[in-house]
Amino acid sequence: MSAYADHIATVRARFDAALEASNFDSVLVYAGQPRLAFLDDNPYPYRVNPLFKYWIPVTQSPKSALFYQPGQKPVVFLFQPRDFWHAQAQVPKEEWQDYVELVIVDDQKKIESHLGDKLKDAALLGEDFAEPVASWPVKAWNPQALLDHLHFHRAIKTDWEVQNLRVANERAAKAHLAARAAFFAGASELEIHQAYLRAINFRESEVPYNSIVALNDHGAILHYDIYDTEAPADPARSFLIDAGATYRGYCADITRTYARDEKGFFQDLIDAVDEAQQDLLKEIKPGRDYYELHVSQHLKISAILSRFGFVEGSAESIYEQGYSSAFFPHGLGHFIGLQVHDVGGYLRNDRGDSYDRDVRHPFLRLLRPVEAGQVFTIEPGLYVVDQLLEDFSGNKDFNWDRIAELRPYGGVRIEDSIVVGENGNNENLTRDAFEKLKN
Ligand code: GLY
Ligand code: MN
Ligand code: MN
């Protein structure tokens, strides 16, 4: 069986179970369509419904839909309007077409007339802001029980999904190297961003999230995406880039940090965070809690804070007093797949019960036990975020002079995506992708 054949069999089985558990006969998955800007006739970039691309790797055919009734072949209504204003995205002959009934429609009303009475028993998964879809007489829109069931099981990736994630990482790694070269050549943030896109031949709307391209102290702004158009007068001393790519609808999410001065203290700090991240990777095994990994990473970051003299005390005391959260405020990582922040990280089971968020770590997006087949990021960071440090002003455990030395560099983050193996034999999609580029 091919990897895709196995994937779509898994998706069918997951929908069978989810439909049965939520008491629906069938489902209509709407691909979505672009929204128009307010009072305007220009659309925002289109993003396909992730549950549509879960079935088939079609990401640029808005207004299409997929109908599935357990036991029957899925029917894909591929929307190809007769329109002399716009070009149609080409949908080449590909393997997925062997596993569905393909119906080309040039008018969405034909989807309704084709399905007839079946619509009234179907759950519709998708956005409902536009006619005629908004008036389709379906049984329910986005029922939570059906979504929860599907989202819970999406955490375990099929081999085909992992293959796609591998290629997405290879694309992103290639672009990261181009961005790195642009940084060392003295480019501005915008020029680095452009070098990144050029390296993979992407338009900006194709990257899975706004790339974070941050020189100097901008690295401390966690989601920095307002690029300076001019390079700094003095060559930038540091560079943090968090940027991804997609392949067949699957996402990469990679962060690297660079120092211009290979021998300075900032390079030492990057090396320390990198080592702490790789040490943490060794702890990933089925049965561990992701939350425990997050705490373990905090202790390693706390040890760095102590060793580099930013904060006084043992790693345990730095963590226990909440000091490390001022420097590493975000979560250790998140599921990744069809979405960069893939769904289901808080779900305890497929009935929709969720884990309680932890007040100490409110931004941690993943609270589930680690299982083989999950794919998630591991992305520790250490930054000078003045807003967070204000809470500790005057605290004698903080070495403010030392922190002031780090401030102009922003901070460090290192982010890889990991496929969990059965016995700790995990796959690092990101480091493997960079390694492959060396060959
Ligand atoms: N790029 C967003 C994140 O790392 O979660
Ligand atoms: Mn991430
Ligand atoms: Mn990221």
Image: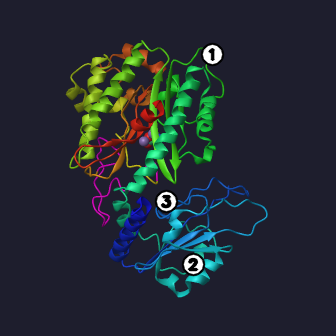
Residue interval drawn in magenta:
339-367
Indicate which disc, 1 or 2, sits on the residue closer to the N terminus. 2
Q: Which residue carries the number 1 mark?
A: 233
Outermost residue toward the right?
84
Q: Looking at the image, can residue 147 be seen?
A: no
- Closest to the observer, 268 or 357: 268
Q: Check residue 303 in the rendering and tell me which mark sits there, or answer none.
A: none
Q: Is residue 177 left or right of residue 21?
A: right
Where's residue 173, x and y in %? Answer: 49, 36
Mark 1 nearby-residue class (10 Å; few <14, some 14–19, many ≥20) = few
Mark 1: amino acid: Ala
Mark 2 nearby-residue class (10 Å; few <14, some 14–19, many ≥20) = some
Residue 135 figure quarter? bottom right
Q: Which residue carries the number 3 mark?
A: 50
Indicate which disc, 3 or 1, sits on the residue closer to the N terminus. 3
Q: Secondary structure at mark 2?
A: loop
Q: Depth-wise, is mark 2 or mark 3 nearer the camera?
A: 3
Residue at 73% across, 58% down: 41
From this view, report whether residue 48 is shown above or below residue 106.
Answer: above
Where's residue 157, x and y in %? Answer: 37, 55
Where's residue 291, x and y in %? Answer: 26, 44
Q: Check residue 136 in the rendering and tell me which mark sits there, or answer none.
A: 2
Where's residue 325, x and y in %? Answer: 33, 33
| Alpha carbon separation for disc pair 2 and 3 | 21 Å
State ligand 3's quadrant: top left
Q: Is residue 275 magenta?
A: no
Outermost residue toward the bottom?
117
Mark 2: amino acid: Trp
Q: Looking at the image, can residue 70 be seen?
A: yes
Q: Secondary structure at mark 1?
A: loop
Q: Is residue 354 magenta?
A: yes
